[in-house]
Amino acid sequence: MEKHRITMGNLFSGSGTWELAAKICGIDVIFESEIEPFPVALEAKRFPEAIQLGDNQMTIAYEKKENLPAYTLKIRGGARHIYET
């Protein structure tokens, strides 16, 4: 049986705690959305394969143009905002 990879995108990434937890659990980070310069630079170094969207509105634009690869989970900052796609 083929196993399917779980993938995620994160809006309001901040310091990337969700991304680090995902990496530990074997989840691939597809995109991140953060506007603060230091966290953006930190996350770009930690996850060079992830698309750095910057402003949250870019996520909507990318999804409308279908430029984002498929992902399983969309995280919005804190634990209260977990959405499955």
Image (cartoon, helix red, strand yellow):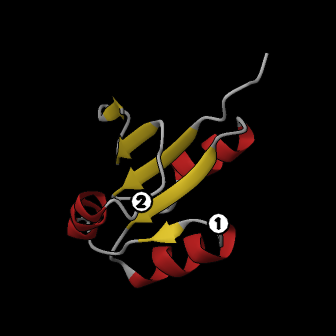
Q: Is residue 50 left or right of residue 54?
A: right
Q: Foreground residue, 24 or 64?
A: 64
Horizontal side of residue 82 vs 61, given as left or right: right
In the rendered image, residue 72, in percent from the top left (x then y), is placed at 48, 36
Amino acid type, callout 2:
Leu
Depicted 26 relative to depicted 65: above or below: above
Q: Would you call the spot at circle 1 few (<14 residues within 10 Å), some (14-19), or many (20 or more)?
A: many
Q: Please, is residue 13 above or below residue 40 in the view?
A: above
Q: Quadrant of the N terminus?
A: top right
Instruction: Please give the residue where the numbered disc 1 appears in the rendered image.
Output: 47
Q: Is residue 34 visible?
A: yes
- Residue 35 place in picture, x, y as percent: 32, 76
Image-quadrant location for residue 67: bottom left
- Amino acid type at mark 1: Phe
Q: Which mark is residue 68?
A: 2
> Helix, strand, or loop for circle 1?
loop
Residue drawn at x 48%, y 81% as measured from the top left: 38
Q: Secondary structure at mark 2?
A: loop
Q: Residue at x 66, y 76 (%)?
A: 45
Circle 2 or circle 1, nearest the eye: 2
Q: Nearer the viewer, residue 37 or 65?
A: 65
Residue 73: give x, y in percent of width and height: 44, 37
